[in-house]
Image (cartoon, grey):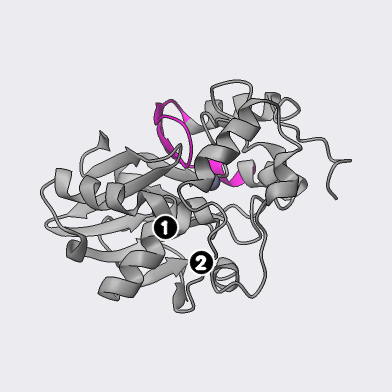
């Protein structure tokens, strides 16, 4: 765990992160790991002296299974409201699916991609989850603990969103900007490996929305938190886009 900024906590599960914002004794949870990470999410909440019932709202950066575990679980058990980008609401409901499957795993570097795939199947990678009752986020500071601001960063999925915390100068980038991934060949600011992305062009363009934020604490969906100006980090990710497999001829 790291307290990346005052009352902004970042936790790691099975090669995936979630974030907790605290305001008094009220919490916002952002993303929720794999289905098998639910006990770790609960433990992370208890480690800061709170309990799952203190979570007043849950934000979903995007509806991939590695981010939905505790989101779906808490929503079902505690009726915690869940919010996502207005487009991603439909993905969370599984009106369609934009998620890499077993076939896509063959496209990654070996053997690490295969090793990762075997590991994540044990935490529910092929489980089918959906959340019907997801609410669309509005513009500007959300009226939930921490008052995050949604930043549309469509591309990794059609309705992916990052979340900005202006007072903390922090940005929760989800999978729009990572600092590492088990299937990536290098560490540092980078796009999510190409075979997980719905649209390569849009995922690259989404960096424009991150670049202009006032932030120097970067909390990614995968990899360690990074203290660095977001514009610099975006510059590095753009320079390494080709190494991340962002060759437009691969996916239109
Ligand atoms: Zn992810």
In the image, residue 176 lies at what x, y percent? 57, 44
Between 18 and 107, the one lying in front of the other is: 107
In the image, residue 177 lies at what x, y percent? 55, 38
| Horizontal side, residue 2 vs residue 184: left or right | left
Q: Is mark 1 within 8 Å of ligand 1?
A: no
Numbered range of the magenta stretch = 208-229
Label 1: few (<14), some (14–19) or many (≥20) C-alpha neighbours in 10 Å? many
- Residue at left 36%, top 59%? 70
Would you say the residues marked 2 and 1 are in contact, meaning their CB atoms lie under 8 Å apart? yes
Q: Is residue 96 above or below residue 32?
A: below
In the image as oriented, which residue stretches furthest toward the top? 186
Reply yes or no: does residue 222 show up in magenta: yes
| Horizontal side, residue 231 vs residue 5: left or right | right
Labelled disc at residue 129: 2
Q: Which of marks 2 and 1 is nearer the N terminus?
A: 1
Q: Element under label 1?
A: helix
Q: In this view, does 121 lie above or below 71?
A: above
| Horizontal side, residue 220 vs residue 152: left or right | left
- Which quarter of the figure is the N terminus placed in? top left
> Is residue 145 visible in the rendered structure shown here?
yes
Q: Is residue 241 above or below residue 250?
A: above
| Horizontal side, residue 205 vs residue 63: left or right | right
Distance from Cα at disc 2 to Cα at disc 1:
8 Å
Residue 38 placement: quadrant: bottom left
In the image, residue 7 lies at what x, y percent? 21, 44
Residue 72 placement: quadrant: bottom left
Disc 1 target residue: 69
> Is residue 162 visible in the rendered structure shown here?
no
């Amino acid at each position: 765990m790291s307290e990346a900024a005052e009352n902004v906590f970042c936790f790691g599960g099975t090669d995936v992160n979630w974030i907790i914002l605290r305001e008094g004794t009220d919490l916002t949870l952002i993303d929720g790991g794999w289905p098998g990470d639910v006990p770790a999410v609960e433990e992370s909440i208890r480690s800061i002296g709170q309990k799952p019932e203190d979570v007043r709202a849950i934000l979903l950066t995007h509806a991939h299974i590695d981010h939905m575990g505790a989101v779906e679980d808490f929503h079902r058990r505690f009726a915690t409201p869940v919010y996502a980008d207005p487009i991603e609401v439909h993905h969370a409901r599984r009106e369609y699916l934009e998620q890499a499957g077993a076939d896509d795993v063959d496209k990654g570097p070996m053997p690490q991609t295969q090793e990762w795939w075997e590991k994540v199947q044990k935490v529910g990678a092929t489980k089918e989850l959906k959340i019907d009752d997801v609410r669309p986020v509005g513009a500007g500071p959300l009226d939930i603990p921490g008052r995050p601001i949604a930043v549309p960063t469509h591309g990794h999925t059609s309705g992916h969103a990052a979340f900005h915390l202006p007072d903390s100068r922090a940005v929760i980038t989800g999978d729009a900007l990572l600092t590492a991934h088990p299937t990536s060949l290098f560490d540092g600011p980078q796009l999510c490996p190409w075979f997980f992305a719905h649209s390569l062009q849009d995922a690259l363009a989404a960096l424009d929305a991150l670049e202009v934020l006032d932030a120097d604490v970067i909390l990614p969906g995968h990899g360690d938190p990074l203290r660095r100006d977001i514009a610099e980090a975006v510059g590095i990710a753009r320079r390494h886009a080709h190494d991340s497999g962002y060759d437009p001829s691969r996916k239109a």
